C-alpha cells in the first residue's frame, strides 16, 4: 500500500490504538495496521475497526485502567 500523505510504502505491524466508542476512550494493544515506513501514518482496515467495536460492545478483559488528563 502507498501512503496518501507522503507516498511512502507501508508494511503490516501490530500497534497500540486509541479508540473512542460511545463517548469512552479505549486503548487496544496488538492491533494490525498498515504503517508507513517513511512518515509513520497508520491505516486500519474497515474490518479491523468493526471487530474492535464488536469486542468493546461485549464483555472483554481489562488489562489496566489509566488516568488521563484533558487539557484545553
Image: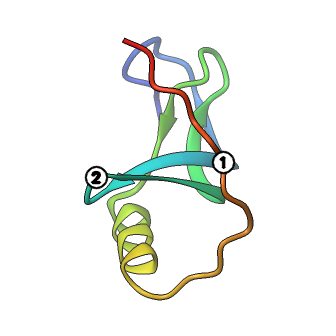
Q: Which of the two residues, 41 or 7, is positioned nearer the viewer here?
A: 41
Q: How many marks?
A: 2
Which residue is found at the position 56% from the left and 49% from the top? Answer: 33
Per the image, the residue denoted by label 1 is 66
The location of residue 18, given as percent across then percent down, is: 51, 45
Q: Is residue 7 left or right of residue 29?
A: left
Compared with 10, 20 (above or below) is below
Position of residue 54 in the picture relative to residue 12 (left or right): left
First in sequence: mark 2 vs mark 1: 2
Asked if the residue under mark 1 is in contact with the one under mark 2, i.e. CB atoms within 8 Å, the reply is: no
Q: Residue at x 44, y 16 (%)?
A: 71
Q: Farthest residue toward the right?
A: 63
| Residue at the limit of the structure toward the left, as seen here | 22
Residue in the picture at 36% in, 70% down: 53
Q: Nearer the viewer, residue 68 or 9?
A: 68
**Secondary element at image label 2:** loop
Left or right: 7 as drawn, with respect to 37: left
In the rendered image, residue 15, in percent from the top left (x then y), is placed at: 67, 47
Which residue is depicted at the point 61% across and 23% down? 40
Viewport quadrant of the C terminus: top left
Q: Is residue 69 visible?
A: yes
Cα–Cα span, label 2 and label 1: 16 Å
Q: Residue 34 location, x and y as percent?
A: 55, 44
Place residue 37 in its image quadrant: top right
Quickly name the residue at label 2: 23
Of helix, strand and loop, which one carries label 1? loop
Locate residue 21: give its quadrant: bottom left
Amino acid at each position: 500500500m502507498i501512503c496518501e500523505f507522503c507516498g511512502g510504502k507501508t508494511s503490516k505491524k501490530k500497534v497500540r490504538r486509541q479508540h473512542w466508542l460511545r463517548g469512552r476512550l479505549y486503548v487496544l494493544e496488538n492491533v494490525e495496521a498498515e504503517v508507513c515506513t517513511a512518515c509513520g501514518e497508520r491505516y486500519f482496515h474497515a474490518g479491523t475497526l468493526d471487530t474492535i467495536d464488536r469486542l468493546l460492545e461485549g464483555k472483554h478483559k481489562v488489562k489496566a485502567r489509566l488516568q488521563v488528563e484533558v487539557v484545553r
